[in-house]
Amino acid sequence: MKPSIPKGTRDFSPVEMARRNYIFDTIRDVFRLYGYRQIETPSMENLSTLMGKYGEEGDKLLFKIQNSGDYFQGITDEELLSRNSLKLASKFCEKGLRYDLTVPFARFVVMHREELQFPFKRFQIQPVWRADRPQKGRYREFYQCDADVVGSDSLFYELELIQMIDTVFSRFGVRVAIKMNNRKILAGLAESVDQADRMTDITVAIDKLDKIGLDGVNAELLEKGLPQEAVDKLQPIIKLQGTNEEKLKVIETVLSGSETGLRGIEECRYILHKVSKTRLNNTLELDLTLARGLNYYTGAIFEVKALDVEIGSISGGGRYDNLTGIFGMPGVSGVGISFGADRIYDVLNQLNLYPEATVSGTKVLFLNMGEAEADFCMQVLSDLRNAGISAELYPDAAKMKKQMSYANALGVRYVAIVGGDELATGKVTLKDMESGEQQLLTSEELISALR
């Protein structure tokens, strides 16, 4: 029987790994550029850390790890026969695979608070696991690339995250629209139509504008039990067009009676003003229909859309007021972003934006023409590797055609040949596999040519 892997997981070939590493390395370099420092947390956490943090649905999607040893010990026959899988799992599973990087980060901050300097700027690039139904673009194991700063209310960090997003996508060569909204504006919006307790229903519906259109949004709002009068009042906001400042002026009039809403407008205005002093390559657009994960965010929220490819959000984040409250350490405000590595991978593939150097492994392959020739090649190989040039020697003196085919199959750009003539002069013939051009070079000249 042919081996297989679990549904919702993937193998990555050397070419795919080279491309993924290009994405991770680019994001990692930008995080470091802005002073964020890397941490890692264990793949598994205590279930007590994870349970109850993602809502009822999230709890069901946690991969639980069976205790080692006699895990039936202490379980009664009655409990076993009840077949209550959730209750039984809580008895013989004490650990689970992490579902995201945010809850482990909150746990990390609480556990290490005495050693940390606040504001604390961290980034984390690690896999997470969800027992979800696998489908196109949704996996059970995938990577998250998060950067957060905790322990400061300063809106300066919102500005910094916008600049980081801009820097990352500029380096990838991907044109994006950075969309921004504020949770306080959304709360004010619900207040202004006398539906403060229906904020989630309103924002979840408005958030679908791109997918279901204006009529679909209105139908959903009425279906959720909003009165027609409230739906009518929301129309100017849902249809809002114009520049960022024009949008703010309209919303300011609508939210004039909401203190929370006006505070959100003030925050947006401050961020937009500060951004205008920087040199962004991409546009920052105020989008009042943007909602994101509402139970979590309390201030500015962001989402990034690629302009040249049809795909969902490729990055997002926002401000939250109480990251560590779930672990008994209230009042730690933070703001963070997450880059969707898998979606970025799809975008770069579709736009063919990988630099050639990312996927090429070996730069030069030395052909093996015999024992004496191979011994000489080994010395030159050492010089090349010491100079940081990736090089390898074919392992045996096979037919030249076979060795050349191997170089082609691996996409090796240069082939180095040392036969009797080269051995006599202490030189190497370098062949460019693309142009077919050949040069006879000393070891030093070879290093210069390959650099």
Image (tube, grey):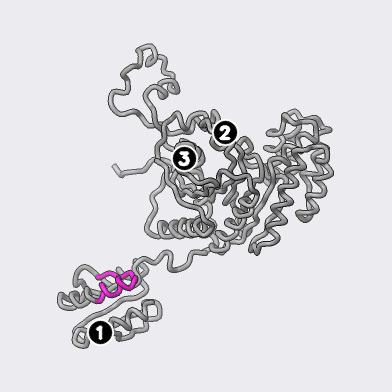
Marker count (numbered): 3
Q: Amino acid at mark 2?
A: Pro
Question: Could you tell me residue 160's position as x and y percent?
Answer: 60, 55
Residue 97, percent across and down? 42, 36
Residue kind at label 1, given as amino acid type:
Lys
User: Could you tell me if the residues under marks 3 and 2 are in contact, i.e. CB atoms within 8 Å?
Assistant: no
Q: CA distance from mark 1 to mark 2?
A: 70 Å
Give the secondary structure at mark 1. loop
Q: Is residue 15 above or below residue 204?
A: below
Kindly identify which residue carries mark 1.
427
Q: Residue at x 71, y 54 (%)?
A: 272
Splitting the image into 4 quarters, where does residue 3 fall? top left
The Cα atoms of the two marked residues, 3 and 2, are separated by: 15 Å
User: In which quadrant of the rendered view does residue 448 lie?
Assistant: bottom left
Left or right: 81, with 287 as reference point: left
| Tag 2 residue | 330
The kind of residue on which mark 3 rests is Glu
- Magenta stretch in the rendered image: 380-393
Dot 3 corresponds to which residue?
Answer: 114
Residue 381 against residue 123 in the figure, above or below: below
Pick the quarter of the image with the C terminus: bottom left
If you read the primary sequence from the N terminus, does the residue marked by circle 3 or circle 1 appear first? 3
Q: Nearer the viewer, residue 84 or 271?
A: 271
Packing grade of label 3 (10 A; few <14, some 14-19, many >=20) is few
| Label 2 Cα neighbours within 10 Å, binned few <14 / some 14-19 / many ≥20 | few
Quadrant of the snapshot with the N terminus: top left
Tag 3's secondary structure? loop
Picture coordinates of residue 114, whole percent (x, y): 46, 40
